């Protein structure tokens, strides 16, 4: 099975484990309803495909995370009345494409309140985005269109890839191109870098802010990252909707509000790499962009693996060690 397929299965299985942990932990405390939609059944199927040991580890990690989240989100366990139902929902992948990175939602409609969790299995990537002739990353990511000059630089490269793909009937591989890092990756990455710098000069104070919002999501959320030995919980409280009290019941820990950047400091190659850019922003944000091909066969687009290298000191992070 392809690595990407395995990551998808393990990720969705963990989403189910988190929802189930909320349900099991809270069903005797408050009125809980799991929304059994299509994403729920997909996640359940992924969960059932794992070995018993993997399912047990997911359940343990999810239980640790949920117990902690209940302590810092009192509205999870406290309701206004019997009709104040806590709904648990696994979100469709389409929402992620629209800028909402949350995978599992806990909703109280009567309180007009919800929190979301981004579930991660053993990786810290924030987003996977593509570049191609048909993608205006400036418009899509930042609300500011890319220039004609940018597309003039990348068009011959992607047109050439498209022609090779058609001629080979989608069979020619990247390896057959020889040093495609030099002929494809580097010129596309250079064009991307120059265009991002141009967009920042054109809209100072705007690009840095919107870039982070696009990459980490347009909603506040908790990121739950699990591996073999621990669970890490990060709180992306950009708009102040996390960590709210319920009436006079306060959370057991304080989650600070995160500051978004308003200035792009520099864009450089990371560790002398010709395929990875490091974007440094003020307020302590640093983001890496590694360009790569998503398939062994040639296609007229490239993919970014985007990671948060460093974040503001105000990012709340808590690590829970799992029993071994």
Image (spheres, helix red, strand yellow):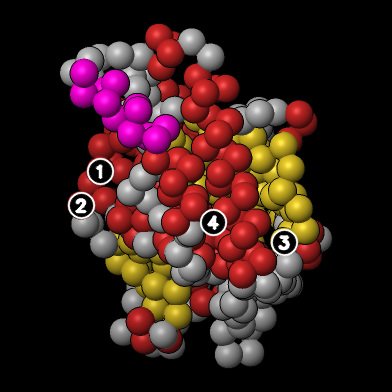
Which residues make up the magenta segment? Answer: 156-167
Q: Residue at x 66, y 66 (%)?
A: 201
Q: Secondary structure at mark 1?
A: helix
The answer to whether residue 37 shows anywhere in this view is yes
The first of marks 3 and 4 along the sequence is 4
The first of marks 1 and 3 along the sequence is 1
Does the residue at mark 1 contact the one at mark 2 (Cβ under 8 Å)?
yes
Q: Is residue 170 left or right of residue 311?
A: left
Secondary structure predominantly adopted by residues drawn in magenta: helix
Mark 1 nearby-residue class (10 Å; few <14, some 14–19, many ≥20): some
Q: Residue at x 59, y 63 (%)?
A: 199
Q: Residue at x 58, y 31 (%)?
A: 186
Mark 2 nearby-residue class (10 Å; few <14, some 14–19, many ≥20): few
Q: In which image quadrant can residue 281 be found?
A: bottom right
Identify the mark at residue 264; answer none if there is no mark: 3
**Pointer 1: what residue?**
42
Of 175 and 290, nearer the camera is 175
Q: Is residue 155 above or below residue 151?
A: above
Does the residue at mark 1 contact the one at mark 4 (Cβ under 8 Å)?
no
Q: Position of residue 287 (x, y in %)?
A: 67, 49
The first of marks 4 and 2 along the sequence is 2
The first of marks 2 and 3 along the sequence is 2
Q: Secondary structure at mark 2?
A: helix
Q: In which image quadrant can residue 205 be found?
A: bottom right
Identify the mark at residue 215; answer none if there is no mark: 4
Mark 4 nearby-residue class (10 Å; few <14, some 14–19, many ≥20): many
Q: Position of residue 89 (x, y in %)?
A: 33, 61
* Cα distance in 3D space between marks 4 and 2: 26 Å
Nearer mark to the viewer, of 2 and 3: 3
**Pointer 2: what residue?**
38
In the image, residue 166 lies in the stretch drawn in magenta:
yes
Q: In which image quadrant can residue 52 be found?
A: top left
């Amino acid at each position: 099975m392809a690595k990407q397929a395995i990551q998808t299965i393990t990720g969705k299985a963990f989403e189910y484990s988190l929802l189930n942990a909320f349900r099991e932990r809270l069903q005797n405390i408050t009125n809980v309803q799991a929304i059994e939609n299509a994403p729920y059944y997909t996640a359940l199927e992924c969960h059932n495909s794992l070995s018993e040991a993997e399912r047990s580890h997911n359940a343990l990690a999810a239980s640790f995370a949920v117990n902690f989240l209940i302590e810092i989100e009192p509205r999870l366990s406290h309701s206004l009345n019997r009709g104040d139902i806590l709904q648990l929902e696994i979100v469709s992948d389409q929402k992620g494409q629209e800028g909402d990175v949350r995978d599992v939602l806990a909703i109280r409609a009567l309180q007009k309140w919800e929190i979301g969790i981004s579930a991660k299995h053993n990786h810290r990537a924030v987003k996977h985005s593509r570049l191609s002739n048909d993608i205006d990353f400036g418009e899509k990511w930042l609300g500011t269109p890319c220039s004609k000059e940018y597309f003039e630089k990348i068009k011959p490269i992607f047109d050439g890839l498209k022609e090779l793909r058609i001629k080979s009937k989608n069979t020619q591989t990247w390896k057959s191109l020889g040093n495609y890092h030099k002929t494809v990756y580097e010129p596309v990455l250079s064009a991307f870098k120059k265009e991002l710098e141009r967009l920042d000069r054109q809209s100072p104070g705007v690009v840095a802010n919107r870039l982070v919002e696009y990459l980490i999501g347009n909603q506040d959320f908790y990121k739950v990252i699990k591996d073999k030995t621990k669970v890490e919980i990060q709180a992306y409280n950009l708009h102040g909707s996390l960590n709210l009290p319920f009436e006079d019941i306060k959370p057991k820990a304080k989650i600070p509000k995160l500051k978004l950047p308003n200035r792009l400091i520099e864009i450089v190659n990371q560790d002398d790499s010709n395929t990875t850019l490091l974007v440094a922003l003020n307020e302590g944000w640093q983001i890496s962009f590694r360009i790569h091909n998503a398939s062994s066969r040639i296609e007229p687009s490239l993919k970014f693996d985007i990671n948060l290298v460093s974040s503001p000191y105000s990012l709340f992070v808590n690590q829970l060690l799992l029993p071994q």
